[in-house]
Amino acid sequence: MKNKIIRLFCTFLFITNILSAQQQFNPQDISKAALELIKTNVTYDGSYYSIAYPNGDVPKTIGVCTDVIIRTFRAIGLDLQKEIHEDMSENFDSYPKNWGLKKPDSNIDHRRVPNLMRYFDRKGKSLPITKNESDYYLGDIVAWDLGGGITHIGMVVNILSKDNKRYQIVHNIGAGQVLEDCLFDYNIIGHYRF
């Protein structure tokens, strides 16, 4: 009887792992969650904060570009703070060493663009970087190099530009969480689908 229970439990864990590994998010849900963010007035603030773990967040009235991505996915059931911390804990050498860290830090790692890029590359799908508007679909994540070692990230949403050629972006580049037609305004360095 004990062996049967152990086998059933192991089978349950195996199936649970397969299902969670195959979890996919609906692009419409991602877009809707990102668009909800522009309703909140946010002051740009990238300061280091000690936050709860898991499901920790900086105060809702502040944020940076990465917080747009974090809050979008949290709204549809994915805690990037937890996911990135766990992945970094198991694969620390796979992540950038831009900040001189010796180990993961659940307070800040998920709030850094290069770490989000690495996570989406590892756990999502890295897509080609093109100049073709139709290659960027709602729910996609786009990362840019702004120059001078500054990176930026935003979410493609289901609202077309005025010329109806491309989807717009929800991001925070200093003026809060906003919707803008800015896909090709900066040098794209990453394109992901999760």
Image: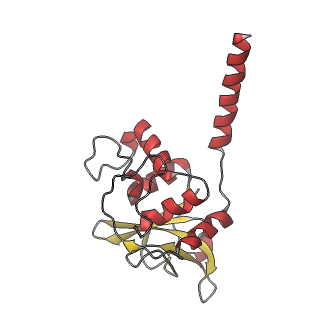
> Measuring 65% from the left and 30% from the top, which residue is drawn there?
13
| Quadrant position of residue 73 | bottom right
Q: Is residue 113 above or below residue 54?
A: below
Q: Residue furthest left?
A: 100
Q: Nearer the viewer, residue 190 or 19?
A: 19
Place of residue 94 in the rendered image (x, y in percent of width and height, measured from the top left)? 40, 43
In this figure, which colouring scheme has been used for the structure?
A: secondary structure
| Quadrant position of residue 60 | bottom left
Considering the image in quadrants, where does the C terminus appear? Answer: bottom right
Residue 37 showing in the rendered view: yes
> Measuring 54% from the left and 76% from the top, which residue is drawn there?
39
Place of residue 147 in the rendered image (x, y in percent of width and height, measured from the top left)? 31, 71
Left/right placement of residue 46 relative to residue 128 reads left
Left/right placement of residue 154 relative to residue 111 reads right
Residue 131 showing in the rendered view: no
Considering the image in quadrants, where does the N terminus appear? Answer: top right
Q: Is residue 48 above or below residue 10?
A: below
> Measuring 61% from the left and 89% from the top, which residue is drawn there?
163
Q: Is residue 128 above or below residue 44?
A: above
Place of residue 116 in the rendered image (x, y in percent of width and height, measured from the top left)? 45, 55
Q: How many marks?
A: 0
Q: Nearer the viewer, residue 120 or 103?
A: 103
> Measuring 44% from the left and 57% from the top, which residue is drawn there?
57
Place of residue 56 in the rendered image (x, y in percent of width and height, measured from the top left)? 45, 52
Q: Residue furthest bottom?
A: 163
